[in-house]
Image (tube, rainbow, N blue to C red):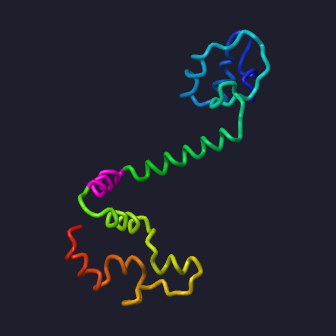
């Protein structure tokens, strides 16, 4: 449906608007005065100053939205991450913790994913990477001695 179909000479066609839109939208539509000039409807993209759609601009907007959603997903933990980065200690330890939390350590499962023939399981217990990092009895002793 075109906007011009919603306009009778110089006013909104209220009956058509009431049948085509939700009641919560009626007042919003009626708050805009209809144009008295009868111009042909056209599509306008509000991200461009002249209303043009540009693929390049669409791509950049999509990437910005993706970055914002990725950032907002991490926001609830931002205090924790800030405390990690601000603690006193070697940066290599901080990076190791960050990589472990983001499943980015060069663990056996990652080597297997890169088609390197190796078992993805803990060499000591035969269990997965999470076990090898946190719950393996050999690793538990290291964590107990650690100040983290």
Instruction: Estimate the x, y position of residue 22 in percent, counting from the top left.
Output: 59, 31
Q: Is residue 143 left or right of residue 131?
A: left
What segment carries the magenta color? 76-86
Which of the 4 quarters of the picture holds residue 30? top right
Nearer to us in this view, 39 or 102: 102
- Considering every residue shown, the one lying at the far right of the view is 40
How many discs appear?
0
Which of the 4 quarters of the picture holds residue 12? top right
Tell me the quarter of the image containing the C terminus: bottom left
Q: Is residue 20 above or below residue 118?
A: above
**Residue at the (76%, 26%) spot, across then down:** 42
Nearer to us in this view, 94 or 3: 94
Q: Is residue 130 left or right of residue 21?
A: left
**Residue at the (45%, 68%) spot, across then down:** 104
Magenta stretch, overall SS:
helix
Instruction: Estimate the x, y position of residue 120 in percent, counting from the top left.
Output: 48, 83
Tell me the quarter of the image containing the N terminus: top right
Q: Is residue 55 above or below residue 113?
A: above
Q: Is residue 105 above or below residue 37?
A: below
Q: Is residue 9 above or below residue 25?
A: above
Q: Is residue 136 left or right of residue 129?
A: left
**Residue at the (37%, 90%) spot, across then down:** 124
Residue 133 in magenta? no
Nearer to us in this view, 104 or 21: 104
Instruction: Estimate the x, y position of residue 122 in percent, counting from the top left.
Output: 41, 85
Q: Is residue 23 left or right of residue 76?
A: right
Nearer to us in this view, 103 or 25: 103
Instruction: Estimate the x, y position of residue 44 in percent, counting from the top left.
Output: 70, 28
**Residue at the (25%, 79%) spot, across then down:** 142
């Amino acid at each position: 449906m075109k906007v011009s179909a919603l306009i009778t000479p110089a006013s909104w066609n209220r009956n058509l608007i009431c049948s085509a839109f939700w009641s919560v939208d009626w007042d919003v539509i009626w708050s805009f005065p209809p144009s008295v000039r009868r111009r042909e409807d056209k599509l306008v993209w509000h991200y461009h100053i002249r209303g043009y759609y540009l693929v390049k601009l669409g791509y950049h907007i999509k990437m910005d939205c993706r970055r914002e959603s990725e950032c907002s997903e991490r926001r609830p933990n931002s205090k924790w991450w800030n405390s990690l980065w601000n603690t006193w200690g070697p940066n290599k330890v901080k990076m190791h913790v960050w990589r472990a939390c983001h499943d980015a350590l060069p663990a056996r499962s990652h080597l297997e994913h890169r088609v390197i023939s190796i078992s993805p399981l803990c060499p000591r217990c035969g269990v997965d990477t999470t076990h090898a990092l946190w719950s393996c009895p050999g690793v538990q002793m290291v964590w107990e001695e650690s100040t983290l």
